[in-house]
Amino acid sequence: MKIDRPSVGVDIEQIFEEQHEYKLVRERDQHINYAHEIHWIEFDEHGHGKAAHESIKEGYTLLMGPLGRPSFIWQTTVVTEIVEQRDDYIKFKTENSNYELFIS
């Protein structure tokens, strides 16, 4: 027996986006990652994480997700160029990709 249920017009993408402060889009394939936290990671001369920062800088990588946890959401390669930067948006290039970071 089939039960008629009303259709619920829910935009899952919009709900997910509204629940996160950061949205990272990789330019070449439009791959999207969302996170509540981000950190800009500085490395030492041996390639070990040296410090976490709140601001982007060439030479840092972007880590999406909480520090000190066994897993994170996403980490970019090293930032090579900051193309554009505003309070709510950063466009940057890394060693192998171009990204747009939207900040709500």
Image (spheres, helix red, strand yellow):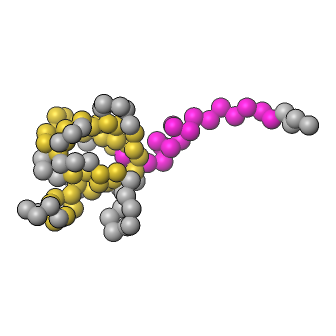
Seen in the image, is 57 located left or right of residue 11?
left
Q: Which residues are magenta?
A: 5-22
Query: Which residue does the image show at 30% across and 32% down from the upper left?
Result: 27
**Residue 87 covered by magenta stretch:** no
How far from the left and from the top, in percent, is residue 71?
A: 39, 62
How far from the left and from the top, in percent, is residue 81?
A: 13, 39
Q: How many marks?
A: 0
Query: Which residue does the image show at 30% across and 40% down from the upper left?
Result: 101
Q: Residue furthest right?
A: 1
| Observer able to see residue 56 | no
Q: Nearer the viewer, residue 63 or 70?
A: 70
How far from the left and from the top, in percent, is residue 57?
A: 14, 49
Query: Which residue does the image show at 24% across and 35% down from the upper left?
Result: 98
Q: Nearer the viewer, residue 97 or 32?
A: 97
Position above or below: 98 against 69: above
| Location of the C terminus (image quadrant) | top left
Q: Nearer the viewer, residue 54 or 48?
A: 48
Seen in the image, is 75 located left or right of residue 1?
left
Query: Which residue does the image show at 22% across and 48% down from the upper left?
Result: 77
| Observer able to see residue 72 | yes
| Location of the N terminus (image quadrant) | top right
The quadrant holding residue 70 is bottom left
How far from the left and from the top, in percent, is residue 11?
A: 57, 34
Position above or below: 43 against 83: below
The quadrant holding residue 4 is top right
